[in-house]
Image (spheres, grey):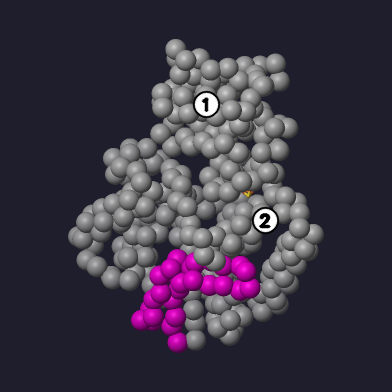
């Protein structure tokens, strides 16, 4: 939604293009994997309202479906995804304890769209004139400063406000009849709020403003001006191998990138005994260890052919100068 668009407008534009026809490339991200799995389990529950004693079976079915999609083994997901078992238990607690609005119209995974802004409402409920829009969050929903709760995360509020605006605008539901709910699975937190018509109108103007800004840049033809390369987002972005802005950022500030490395031909040496790569960056040597032999030889060959190689999903260990190959590491010549 808006905050994710603002994080990298280029990603937003390229993702929109992918949605229009080229098909999505699924990359395993251990942090978002669990979130997607839980949302699938919740979606299935609110579609079928199955008996709670079927929960384990339904969970396993969804897990297998996701493992197939991301091409990973079930055991890998169970043991490497952070807090796998507590999150599974919290999902069951949520479906047991979350009280529905009361009407008989419950729509899980309701797609919403306004202009190019799209989203999926986790749970959309309709009861006579009232609607409720619920977003389930698998992590903590509040910001904490010095041990104190300083309020629900702004990005979550912004996301729900945009959903509310789209429902207000497209389904012509009055602002007073739209309840927005952020439900945190971890600590059983629930935050319910509403907006006035005037506040929704302002949100509409904000969306228009962001889209106009993007269109102005697109008209200039310089897509790179839309990019905001950041480690937290680029590592798992499916456009990273084509993204010149990211490559330039790594070339100019290699130390900023923990998990992604761009191997240039001039400052790389290959240790064929240890299957390690040493890279000289700003007079310091960084190393990538534990590279499988086949991948090591492939990267070495690309390097000998004067090709820059982008490697992502590296694990940083011990110190900032050693990176370890992970099961998820991928690479490509750019
Ligand atoms: S790689 Fe980074 S900068 Fe490039 S589109 Fe993706 S998120 Fe944006």
Please report the residue visible at 66 percent of the width from the left and 79 percent of the height from the top: 197
Residue 76 in the figure: left or right of residue 101:
left
Start-end of magenta stretch: 102-128
Please report the residue visible at 59 percent of the width from the left and 62 percent of the height from the top: 17
Please report the residue visible at 52 percent of the width from the left and 53 percent of the height from the top: 141
Residue 109 highlighted magenta (yes or no): yes
Please report the residue visible at 43 percent of the width from the left and 83 percent of the height from the top: 127
Q: As rendered, which of 221 and 298 lies closer to the eye?
A: 298
Residue 54 highlighted magenta (yes or no): no
Task: State the image coordinates of residue 312 (x, y, percent, origin top left).
Answer: 53, 36
Q: Which mark is residue 301?
A: 1
Estimate the spatial distance between the alpha carbons at disc 1 and disc 2, rounded to whole Å: 35 Å
* Residue 206 seen: no
Mark 1 or 2, nearer chain start: 2
Label 1: element kind: helix
Residue underneath mark 2: 9
Tell me the quarter of the picture where residue 309 sits.
top right
Report the quarter where the C terminus lies: top right
Q: Residue furthest bottom?
A: 128
Q: Is mark 2 within 8 Å of ligand 1?
A: no
Q: Residue furthest front?
A: 305
- Image height of 190 relative to 27, above or below: below
Label 2: element kind: helix
Task: State the image coordinates of residue 224 (x, y, percent, origin top left).
Answer: 72, 50
Q: How many numbered discs?
A: 2
């Amino acid at each position: 939604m808006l905050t994710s668009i603002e994080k990298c407008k280029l990603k937003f534009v390229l993702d929109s293009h992918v949605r229009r026809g080229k098909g999505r490339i699924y990359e395993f991200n251990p942090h978002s994997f669990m979130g997607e799995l839980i949302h699938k389990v919740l979606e299935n529950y609110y579609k079928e309202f199955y008996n709670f004693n079927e929960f384990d079976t339904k969970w396993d079915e969804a897990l297998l479906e996701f493992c197939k999609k991301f091409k990973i083994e079930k055991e890998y997901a169970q043991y490497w995804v952070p807090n796998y078992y507590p999150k599974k238990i919290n999902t069951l607690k949520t479906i047991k304890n979350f009280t529905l609005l009361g009407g008989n119209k419950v729509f899980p995974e309701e797609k919403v769209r306004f202009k190019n802004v799209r989203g999926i409402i986790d749970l959309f409920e309709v009861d006579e004139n009232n609607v409720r829009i619920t977003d389930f969050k698998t992590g903590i929903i509040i910001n904490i400063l010095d041990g104190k709760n300083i309020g629900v995360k702004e990005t979550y509020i912004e996301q729900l406000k945009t959903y509310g605006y789209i429902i207000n605008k497209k389904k012509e539901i009055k602002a007073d009849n739209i309840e927005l709910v952020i439900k945190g699975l971890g600590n059983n937190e629930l935050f319910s709020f509403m907006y006035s018509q005037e506040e929704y109108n302002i949100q509409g103007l904000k969306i228009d403003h962001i889209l106009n800004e993007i269109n102005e840049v697109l008209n200039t033809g310089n897509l790179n001006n839309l990019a905001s390369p950041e480690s937290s987002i680029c590592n798992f972005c499916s456009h990273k191998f084509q993204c010149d802005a990211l490559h330039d950022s790594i070339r100019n500030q290699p130390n900023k990138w923990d998990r992604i490395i761009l191997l240039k031909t001039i400052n790389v040496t290959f240790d064929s005994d240890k299957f390690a790569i040493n890279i000289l960056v700003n007079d310091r040597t960084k190393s990538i260890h534990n590279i499988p032999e086949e991948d090591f030889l492939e990267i070495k060959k690309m390097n000998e052919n004067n090709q820059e190689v982008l490697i992502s999903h590296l694990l940083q260990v011990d110190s900032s100068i050693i990176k370890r190959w992970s099961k998820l590491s991928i690479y490509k010549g750019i």
